[in-house]
Amino acid sequence: MSAPQFADHVDLRLRVNGVVRALDRIDARVSLLDLLREHLELTGAKKGCNHGECGACTVLLDGHRVNGCMVLAAAADGREVVTVEGLASDGQLHAVQRAFIEHDAFQCGFCTPGQVISAVACISEGHATEEREIREWMSGNICRCSSYPQIVEAVKAAAAAENNPPPR
């Protein structure tokens, strides 16, 4: 019996931030993070540890947070990806982005895109009802500047804003 043959390159079609993107002949070993940064020029997700330990590369894949460095781009074929660049709508920042600004939930800003995406997921998953819960569900995102108290306050504020949207 002969060994199975695997493709060196793949053709991908995925929706990124609401736009269908078709990419041809992508190296089958490319991570989702590298696809976003190097092929699509979406540099919001950061390459921190490149081992899935820091959360700087967090993106949403079909609405679930993932570390982009740990997902092969080929696994995203036919799926929906949202990066921090795709959160704003009609020129208006997402509630989480506004809350991070209002609560000064960043210092150097390197981890901020991953923190914001993770916070969006934390809220949508229903894990933003109390401080302890927020800290637990955001624990996969490291902030070397130690802005954790401000991040927790931003997540609480954004969750409250999403539960009580302003009248239009």
Image (spheres, helix red, strand yellow):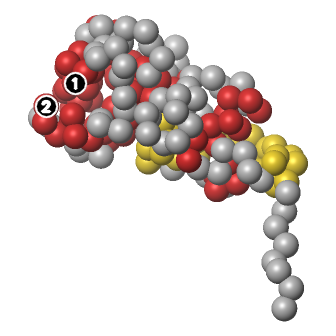
Marks 1/2: CA–CA distance: 7 Å
123 vs 108: above or below: below
Q: Residue at x 17, y 40 (%)?
A: 133
Residue 90 appearing in the image: yes
Q: Percent x, y for residue 33?
A: 62, 37
| Residue nearest the observer in this picture, 100 or 4 | 4
Q: Please state, as top left, top right, bottom left or bottom right, where the C terminus lies in the image.
A: top left
Q: Secondary structure at mark 1?
A: helix
Disc 2 crowd rating (10 Å Cα; few below 14, some 14-19, many 20+) is: some
Q: Percent x, y for residue 24?
A: 86, 46
Q: Amino acid at mark 1?
A: Val
Residue 160 relative to residue 37: left or right: left
Q: Percent x, y for residue 74?
A: 70, 54
| Residue nearest the observer in this picture, 155 or 143 | 143
Q: Quadrant of residue 16?
A: top right
Give the number of the disc on residue 131: 2
Residue 160 relative to residue 21: left or right: left
Q: Residue at x 74, y 40 (%)?
A: 21
Q: Percent x, y for residue 71?
A: 59, 49
Q: Amino acid at mark 2?
A: Glu
| Residue nearest the observer in this picture, 49 or 121 | 49
| Residue position marked by numbered label 1 in the rendering | 152
Kindly check if marks 1 and 2 are in contact, taking CB atoms under 8 A apart as contact: yes
Disc 1 crowd rating (10 Å Cα; few below 14, some 14-19, many 20+) is: many
Residue 147 relative to residue 16: left or right: left
